[in-house]
Amino acid sequence: MKKIILRESQLNHLINKIILNEQEITPFYNGSGNYWATFSGLDDEGRKQEVLKIQNYVNSLKEKTINYFLNFYSNPNTVSKFKNKNNVEALKSFIKTIKVKLNNSPQNNPQPNAQGYVNSKDPSTLYLNLYTFWTGKISITMSEVMDHEIGHSISGYFKTLGETSTQSSQGYYKPEDEKDNYIASNEETYTRIQRLRSILGLKGNEDGVTIMNNIYSQFKNGMFKIPNYSFGKTQDNRYMVFKRISQEKGMLTDLWHVFSPMTYNNNRMDDIAALFAKYSQVKNNMVYLDLNFIGRMNQATKAIQ
Ligand SMILES: [Zn+2]
């Protein structure tokens, strides 16, 4: 038998990974399979207990995200992007009032298929559709959905202040259907830029070349992967280029098919995939991802580390 010796740092890394995964995927549930199938078999009291446990978990995720945003809006670089500086304090007070409601069932639910959503009439409340998590297929984690939806809450509140959360931009393709609209949406773009920042540790003043270097090196070291595509970049450091696409002319949904299997640290990253699809175009059977465009969006979007 081969002996495997782990250094202390490797062991710590492994333990952290296990703990993190458990906190994320099984805060209260041990075992594999469909949690919600088990949940629905519980009696009323059992369900109440489970929901209480989930509520605690959700609150801890919310605190984490809220603190992250409060830090963003304390940074002078972020503050300098506001038309009216008083709005920064108003926004911070708003962020502290954000609450999360849990839906246990798709019934009487305005967006039954979403993992989470924010009602535009009341951006301080976000909803999580619990039954879409822990279904046996791990897709997006709850903390990612929390980050994403709190981004929408904030962006919704920006509107009431007369500030825009980001500049609007069309990307390269005219949306033709619902899926295209979702990829192209300005609202979504705000929250996705936010996700890109938190994942890559980007600052809000960083430009396209800096972001290119960051992303390109993470493709090189294998953190980012797109199955069956090779990658490169243009000499002027404006575009990353991906090879192997079957069509001459791309639509947003085609680009979505290129980027959606992408993984970062072996996890799917739908927000980043949609952002990349929006700012890509197809030329000579290759996909050109415009990092210069993303850099400009980064600088225009209010919120940074
Ligand atoms: Zn969204």
Image (cartoon, helix red, strand yellow):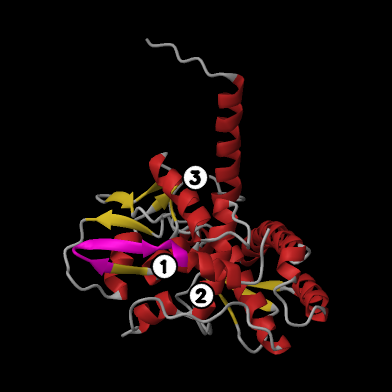
| Secondary structure that dominates the magenta span | strand
Given this view, does label 2 or label 3 mark the residue nearer the observer? 2
Q: Which residue is mark 2?
A: 188
Tell me where residue 165 appears, x and y as whole percent: 62, 78
Q: Going by the image, does 291 lie left or right of 149? A: left
Q: Which residue is mark 1?
A: 274
Pick whichever of labels 1 and 3 is earlier in the sequence.
3
SS at badge 3: loop
Tell me where residue 2 appears, x and y as whole percent: 39, 11
Residue depicted at 66% across the width and 86% down the height: 159
Residue depicted at 54% across the width and 61% down the height: 207
Give the amino acid type for the residue marked by disc 2 in the picture. Answer: Glu
Pick whichever of labels 2 and 1 is earlier in the sequence.
2
Q: Residues within 10 Å of mark 3 (few under 14, many from 20)?
A: few
Dot 2 and dot 1 residues touching (CB under 8 Å)? yes
Disc 2 from disc 3: Cα separation: 34 Å
Pick whichever of labels 2 and 3 is earlier in the sequence.
3
SS at badge 1: helix
- The image's mark for residue 31 is 3
Q: Identify the image quadrant of residue 97.
A: bottom right
> Is residue 192 among what the camera can see?
no
Q: Residues within 10 Å of mark 2 (few under 14, many from 20)?
A: many
Magenta stretch encompasses residue 271? no
- Per the rendered image, the range of residues in magenta is 282-292
Front residue of 102 and 20: 20
Q: Going by the image, does 41 lie left or right of 92? A: left
Dot 1 and dot 3 residues touching (CB under 8 Å)? no
Give the amino acid type for the residue marked by disc 3 in the picture. Answer: Gly
Disc 1 from disc 3: Cα separation: 32 Å
Disc 2 from disc 1: Cα separation: 9 Å
